[in-house]
Amino acid sequence: MPGLASVKSPPDAPPLRISVPEPPPHNPPQTPNKKPPSPSPSRSKPSPARSAKKPPPESPNLDDSSLDNPDLGPFLLKLARDTIASGEGPSKALDYSIRSTKSFERCAVEGEPSLDLAMSLHVLAAIYCSLGRLGEAIPVLERAIRVPDVGRGPDHALAAFSGHMQLGDTYSMLGQVEKSIGCYEEGLKIQMQALGETDARVGETCRYLAEAHVQAMQFDKAEELCNKTLEIHRAHSEPASLEEAADRRLMALICEAKGDYEIALEHLVLASMAMISSGQENEVASIDVSIGNIYMSLCRFDEAVFSYQKALTVFKSSKGDNHPSVASVFVRLAELYHRTGKLRESKSYCENALRIFAKPVPGTTAEEIAGGLTEISAIYESVDEPEEALKLLQKAMKLLEDKPGQQSTIAGIEARMGVMCYILGRYEEARNSFESAVAKLRGSGERKSAFFGVVLNQMGLACVQLFKIDEAAELFEEARAILEQECGPCHQDTLGVYSNLAATYDAMGRVEDAIEILEYILKLREEKLGIANPDFEDEKSRLAELLKEAGRSRNRKAKSLENLIDPNSRRTKKEGTKRWGFRI
C-alpha cells in the first residue's frame, strides 16, 4: 500500500459526489488546473472506468443472523460501491453500507483493530454526507478514527489520517470551522509521524490546512503553514514548479489579507512566470486578475486596468464571452472605475456582469454567481442604491441557502442585508437579518472574530431603533469585549462600540457609566490618537452635557477600561433620555 495520500481540495468545493476508491488507494498525479483530491471517500472522484453507468446489482435478501459470515462484509461493501457506480442512488447503497459495517463489527477479533471496519465506516459517512445527513456522518467518522492503531504501520496510519481529514471536511460543510481545523491538524500530525516532516505529501496537507486557516481569517497561522509548504516543495520540485506557483498564489492571498501588498505582488509575479513557462494560459490570466487587485489596493489604477484587460482578453478567447470568469473581471473593472469616480463606466460593467450571471453557461456553480452578485451589491450600496443592493444580496443568499459548508458566507450576506435594511429604515428586518447572521457565526466557531464583533454592534443599533435598549446594551457589551481582544482599544471599530455603549447607558439611566466610558474615549484620543478626528468634538460635548447634569467636572484621570463598566449597576432611569448619534 502506498504512503499516506495528501488532501487538496478548494475550500469552496461543490457538493459531495460519492465515490468509493477500490483498495489499494492510489495517489493521482497532480495537474496545474486540478487539485489532488482528499484520500477520504467523501472527497475522492470516480475513476473513468467506474463513472459510466452499470446495471444496478441485485439486492440480496439477508437476515441479521447471516451478518456473522466473515465473507459477507466485503461482499456488501462491494455492492455499495457498485450501486453508487451504477447511478442508482445512495439510498440503496446506504443500506448495503450499514449492513457491511454491522458484519465487520460482528466478525472483528476482540483487541484487533479492523481496517475493513474503518473503510466501511468511511464509506457509510460519505453516503450520509451525499444525502445531506451531515449530523449522522459525524459520529460514524468519530468512531472510524478510533479503530486504527497508528503504531501498527502505514496502513493503520493511512486509515487514521483519512478519517481525520474526512471528519474535518464534514465539520467544514457544517460550518464548524474550529472543529474542522482541529481535525486537519490531528491528521497532519499522524501524516508527519508516518512520513516525516519533509515529505512532499506533507506539504500538500500543510497547504490544505493553510487554506482552512485563511477561511477562518487566521492569517498568521496560514502564513506559517504556507511557508512550510513552500520549503517542502522547493526541496522536492524543480525551480518554478507548478506546485511552487500554487503555493505562491496562496501566499499572495494571505499577504493581501494582511495588507502586505508589495510582498503579495512579488509572489504573484513569480507564480505568473512559472505558469507562463508551463504554457498555462488561463492560469496566467487568473493571476493577472489577482495582480490587478493588488495594483488597485496600491492605487496604481492604470496598471490595474492593464492587468484586468489582459485577463479579459484571454478569458474571452478561451472560455467565451458569457463565461463567469469574464463576468468576474467585469466586476473588478466596475469596482476600479467606481473608485476612480467614473460612475458611468462602473455601472456599465456591473450591468454586463449581471447579464452573464442571469444566464450562466453550463458548469457555472452557484457559489460563483453568488460571489459576483455580492460584489456588485457592494458597488450599488456605495452609490446610494440600497434597494438594488438588497435585491442582489437576496438573490445571492437564495443560491447558497441549500449548499453545505456555506454557513459563514451566508452569515456575511445576511449581515450585509441587515445593513441595507437599516439604511432603508426597515429596522425589524435588519434586526432579524443580524440575529440570523449572529446565530450562524456562533455555530461556525467565529464568535471571537472581529467580524462577529462588528455584526453584534450592528444588531445592537437595530435594537436601539426598535427601543429594545436592554438587548442593545448586552450586544454592545459583547461586541466591546471581542473587539478589545481582536483589534485593541484604539481601533475605530472598538471606539465606535464604546460610543454606542455610552449612549445606551445614558438611555438606561446609567449616567455614571456613560460618563466613565466617554472620559476613557477622550483620554485615548488625546494621548494616543490625536484630536483631529471630528468625533472628538462630538464626544467632548456629549460628555460636557452629562457632567453638567451630574453636577461635576471632568475627571482627567480616567479609570482603566477593566473598571469602566459595572454590569451589576442598577441606577434609576433618567426622565429625559439624550438622543445621541449611534455609529455603525
Image: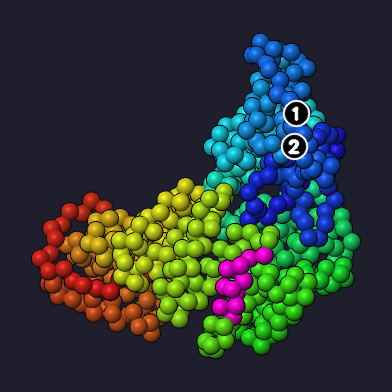
Instruction: Please give the count of numbered marks on the rendered protein.
Output: 2
Reading the image, the residue beneath label 2 is: 86
The type of residue carrying mark 1 is: Pro
Element on which disc 2 rests? helix
Give the residue at x 69% y 33%: 123
Find residue 197 and report its horizontal and vertical position in percent.
78, 47
Residues under numbered marks 1 and 2 in contact, where contact means CB atoms less than 8 Å apart = yes
Find residue 240 and report its horizontal and vertical position in percent.
85, 66
- Image quadrant where residue 210 sits: bottom right
Start and end of the magenta stretch?
349-361
Residue nearest the observer in this picture, 270 or 358 = 358
Give the residue at x 57% y 32%: 139
The type of residue carrying mark 2 is: Ser
| 574, above or below 544, in the image | above
| 222, above or below 40, in the image | below
Give the residue at x 81% y 71%: 281
Dominant secondary structure, magenta: helix
- Let me know if residue 158 appears in the view: no
Element on which disc 1 rests? loop
Indicate whether residue 353 is drawn in magenta: yes
- Let me know if residue 579 appears in the view: yes
**Farthest residue in the top direction?**
65
Reading the image, the residue beneath label 1 is: 57
| 469, above or below 285, in the image | above
- Image quadrant where residue 485 sits: bottom left
